[in-house]
């Protein structure tokens, strides 16, 4: 067997970067061949060049930067609201089993309600303004996050808690100074994952009843059959996602250096 | 007067999923005098850890009671410091802050915490490692920190549950000498659970042998080797005589335990 493909064997950092880039290169290559080679009609799939041109036009003529800012703000607002509720509730549910017993069944039920199905209701309740978009993201993220934080806190090593008790810690001390710090790196990781999902909800929210935002731009572009703009819009979401992901990872490594390699 | 009285303590763990309940400990009584160093010796599954955890307040006995200085034990507390077999340092805290943990829970001023922590860290030979995180320490160093952390609280008793069980043989012997040295200097009352016969004899003023499941005290042997003891005592004929006797006692129990498992 090739030594490169030994199970669980780490790969050298340079090779890792090269392989990661190679995947992108292949992707663009395939895209280019499909479009420039005439295998797919421009009406269905714009070529990389046309997409870039459409993107430049979006920024120059259609104020796309503002759309991006509006969408980022909506994701951020909905996500922060969800985290502000879900993280404390999840910690309480993980730490105190009666609280878990009370909320768990309901949250598990609510978790399966598709956020997009709430859009018509939310338009009734909150109109078509910012609040409605933010609430879609909130509903989509909050229940997932509650469950994840609960599982993380429940899984904290019980011997750490026992050690704290034998050192004289009381209930609040155990929750605030053992469970919370022990769970923090994983909670941070859960936030990173859920933020990714929040991005999928915001676009759905913007497809209906929005006058600004990346999702609104994509719907607008559809009306003119401008696949270049549509693809560029989707592409930008991916780029923003990649950037936030890297930021979260860097922040995690910085905030919790003790948890590295665990 | 006894420092610790264990009176007719028994423990039965309820059966799960229609399995029969497990009787871990038949009614057991034991008196521990002030400044005694007691080792509890027995094969795995003899209930020795259960007995220790009941004294620590981490398990509640099914019947009977534990009195520390004539006061009933009802839960874990800082008056009984404990060192666990697993590494239970808080990974997010530095070595110094781990030792400060109990003092901080008690609300001691920071300067006082630091003075006490540094004194005990020096006693276990960890001067210069105050700002390390547990992940940067070897197993032996982690257990020395855990010992300092328990001692810093100035507990009435020190409870040790096979604290050196995960260490290599050489480190283990050094740790035994370290602990014995601390005991010879401070004369804390110690209860030490182990399955290692040499370890039990070397440190103890009394060895309590426990029988295979259900656990009960089989014999109680005072160790009359002079103090201060050095590692050289392990090669004396007196030590060998104790070892021969205890080896016989334990062997019978181990055979019993093994045949029960079949």
Image: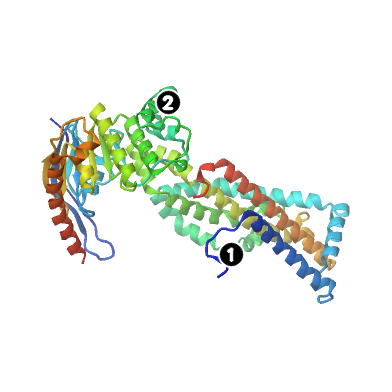
Query: Quadrant of the image for the C terminus of chain B?
Result: bottom left
- According to the picture, the residue beneath numbered tag 1 turns out to be A4
Residue B36 position by quadrant? top left
Rendered position, B68 above or below B248: above
**Disc ID at residue A130:** none
Left or right? Give the position of A197 relative to A145.
right
- According to the picture, the residue beneath numbered tag 2 turns out to be B114
Q: Identify which residue, B168 or B151, lies in the foreground.
A: B168
Residue depicted at x 49% and y 48%: A89
Left or right? Give the position of A109 relative to A249.
left
Return the x and y of residue A16 as percentages of the image width and height: 64, 58
Return the x and y of residue A254 as percentages of the image width and height: 59, 41
Q: Identify which residue, A210 or A111, lies in the foreground.
A: A111
Residue depicted at x 50% and y 62%: A109
Q: Is mark 2 on a helix, strand or loop?
A: helix
Confirm whether residue A82 shows in the render.
yes
Left or right? Give the position of B244 relative to A130.
left
Return the x and y of residue B235 as percentages of the image width and height: 19, 41
Rendered position, A182 above or below A239: above
Q: Identify which residue, A79 or B187, lies in the foreground.
A: B187
């Amino acid at each position: 067997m090739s030594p490169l493909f030994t199970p669980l064997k780490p790969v050298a950092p340079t090779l890792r970067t090269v392989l990661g880039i190679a995947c992108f290169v292949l992707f663009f290559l395939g895209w280019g061949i499909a479009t420039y080679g005439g295998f797919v009609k421009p009406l269905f799939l714009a070529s990389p060049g046309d997409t870039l041109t459409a993107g430049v036009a979006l920024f120059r003529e259609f104020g796309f930067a503002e759309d991006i800012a509006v969408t980022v703000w909506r994701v951020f607002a909905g996500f922060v609201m969800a985290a502000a509720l879900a993280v404390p509730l999840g910690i309480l549910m993980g730490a105190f089993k009666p609280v878990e017993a009370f909320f768990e069944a309901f949250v598990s039920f609510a978790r399966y309600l598709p956020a997009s199905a709430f859009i018509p209701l939310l338009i009734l309740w909150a109109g078509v303004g910012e609040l409605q978009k933010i609430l879609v993201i909130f509903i989509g993220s909050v229940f997932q996050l509650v469950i994840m934080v609960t599982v993380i806190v429940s899984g904290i090593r019980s011997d750490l808690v026992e050690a704290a008790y034998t050192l004289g810690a009381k209930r609040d001390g155990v929750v605030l100074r053992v469970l919370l710090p022990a769970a923090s790196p994983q909670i941070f990781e859960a936030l990173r994952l859920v933020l990714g999902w929040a991005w999928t909800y915001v676009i759905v929210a913007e497809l209906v009843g929005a006058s600004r935002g990346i999702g609104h731009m994509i719907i607008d572009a559809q009306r003119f059959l401008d696949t270049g703009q549509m693809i560029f819009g989707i592409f930008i979401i991916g780029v923003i996602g990649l950037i936030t992901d890297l930021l979260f990872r860097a922040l995690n490594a910085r905030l919790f250096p003790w948890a590295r390699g665990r | 007067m006894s420092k610790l009285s264990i009176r007719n303590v028994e423990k039965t763990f309820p059966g799960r999923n229609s399995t029969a309940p497990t009787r871990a400990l038949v009614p057991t009584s034991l008196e521990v005098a002030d400044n005694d160093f007691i080792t509890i010796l027995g094969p795995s599954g003899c209930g020795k850890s259960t007995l220790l955890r009941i004294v620590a307040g981490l398990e509640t006995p099914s019947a009977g009671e534990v009195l520390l200085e004539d006061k009933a034990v009802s839960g874990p507390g800082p008056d009984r410091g404990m060192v666990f077999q697993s590494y239970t340092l808080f990974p997010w805290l530095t070595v110094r802050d781990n030792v400060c943990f109990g003092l901080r829970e008690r609300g001691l001023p920071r300067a006082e915490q630091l003075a006490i922590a540094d004194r005990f860290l020096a006693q276990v030979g960890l001067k210069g490692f105050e700002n390390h995180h547990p992940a940067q320490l070897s197993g032996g160093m982690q257990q020395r920190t855990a010992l300092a952390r328990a001692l810093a609280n100035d507990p009435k008793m020190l409870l040790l549950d096979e604290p050196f069980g995960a260490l290599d043989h050489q480190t283990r012997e050094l740790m035994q000498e370290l602990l014995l040295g601390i005991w010879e200097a401070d004369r804390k009352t110690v209860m030490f659970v182990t399955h290692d016969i040499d370890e039990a004899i070397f440190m103890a003023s009394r060895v309590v042998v426990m029988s295979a499941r259900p656990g009960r005290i089989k014999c109680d042997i005072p160790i009359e080797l002079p103090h201060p003891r050095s590692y050289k005592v392990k090669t004396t004929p007196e030590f060998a005589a104790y070892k021969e006797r205890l080896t016989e006692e334990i062997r019978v129990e181990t055979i019993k335990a093994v045949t029960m498992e079949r």
